[in-house]
Amino acid sequence: MKQRAITAGIITLIFIPLLLFNVLLIPFKIFIGLLAMIAVYELIRMFEREKEVHWLAKVAIFFFTAGFYVIVGNLWENDPNILISDLSMDISLILLPAILILFTLSVFIPNFGGKSLGLGLLIIIYVGLGLGSLAILRVLGSRYVVYLLLTTVSTDTFAFLFGIKFGKHKMAPTISPKKSWEGAIAGTILGTTLGSLFGILYFVFPEGTILNPTGSMTILDGITTLGNSQTFPSHPIMWQHVLIIIPITLLISIFGQLGDLFASKLKRTYEIKDFGSIFPGHGGVLDRFDSVIFSGMFLVFIFKVMSILWPVA
């Protein structure tokens, strides 16, 4: 437990300045990109418990995962005032060549068959899209990453605490025996509450501060005009924003837990305790970011849909 706390403290000390200061936007992208490459290594090593992956296939998987991360994360963008509608997410630019190359490799590499091909695509999409989503949220503004982390981390924390004390009904006994419905429900309620309060009461952060450089009223400002006044399109109607933010936060909490269960199923399938050991007491990159990967992809998706249907002028 002591080692776990020390590691968490070190991660926090590294992550907070990278997250909050725009001058460190590029180092943040590089840091998350390095974590993505470590995550690829963790998954390949896990899959190799069954069968070795040819070195050419490994190179292709690393390369195309990096490509997904760069394109989805819009790593060339450094404008702190950019809107999500201005960001490109055309993953076909990397998905099509990835499929062509991997399919070609499956022809010429004897042990790179259907299952190995599917696992390669899983790595590329899971890691590239997942951590790329975290990068794109940081490009849009640190407040979106804080919102995401506040919701997922508080959900995980309260689910764990309530599950230990009150958990009686197993949620997924064959995948993660320690998780209970009581813990999941408590985590969802409290995670949704804290995340929603941050998103709704965003105006308490003064304009020009690190978390609110543009004077936004809620977390939806700059994303969509849904819930805004028709007379004054830039002015949110607070009760309508409340009715939008709470369901979104609820789904972030739920998807975070599903991401945790998905990672647990992978570990259970390949009979490993942790994906890696880069974070002493915590495990590997995917052990720490499994919830964020799922919830981050959902948040980017819902933000993009809202920006298309109800765009900011």
Image (cartoon, rainbow, N blue to C red):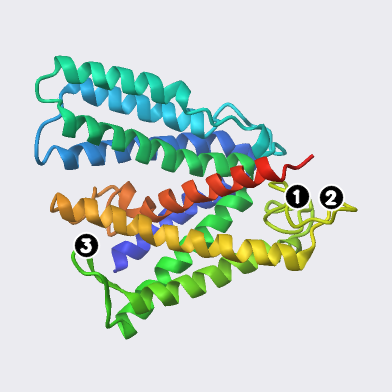
Q: Amino acid at mark 3?
A: Ile
- Name the residue that disc number 3 marks: 175
Q: Residue at x 26, y 36 (%)?
A: 41
Q: Position of residue 92 (x, y in %)?
A: 46, 25
Q: Position of residue 156 (x, y in %)?
A: 40, 66
- Above-or-below relation of 130 to 70: below
Helix, strand or loop for disc 3: loop
Could you tell me how far apart the alpha carbons at marks 2 and 3 are, in whole angstroms? 47 Å
Could you tell me how far apart the alpha carbons at marks 2 and 1 are, in whole angstroms? 6 Å
**268 and 18: which is toward the camera:** 268
Q: Amino acid at mark 1?
A: Thr
Q: Amino acid at mark 2?
A: Pro
- Above-or-below relation of 204 to 211: below
Crowding at mark 1 (Cα within 10 Å: few <14, some 14-19, many 20+): many
Label 2–label 1 contact, CB within 8 A: yes
Label 1–label 3 contact, CB within 8 A: no
- Name the residue that disc number 2 marks: 233
Q: Residue at x 30, y 32 (%)?
A: 121
Mark toward the start of the polypeptide (1 vs 3):
3
Labelled disc at residue 225: 1
Q: Position of residue 95 (x, y in %)?
A: 40, 26
**209 and 161: which is toward the camera:** 161
Q: Residue at x 24, y 40 (%)?
A: 43
Say which quadrant the N terminus sits in: bottom left
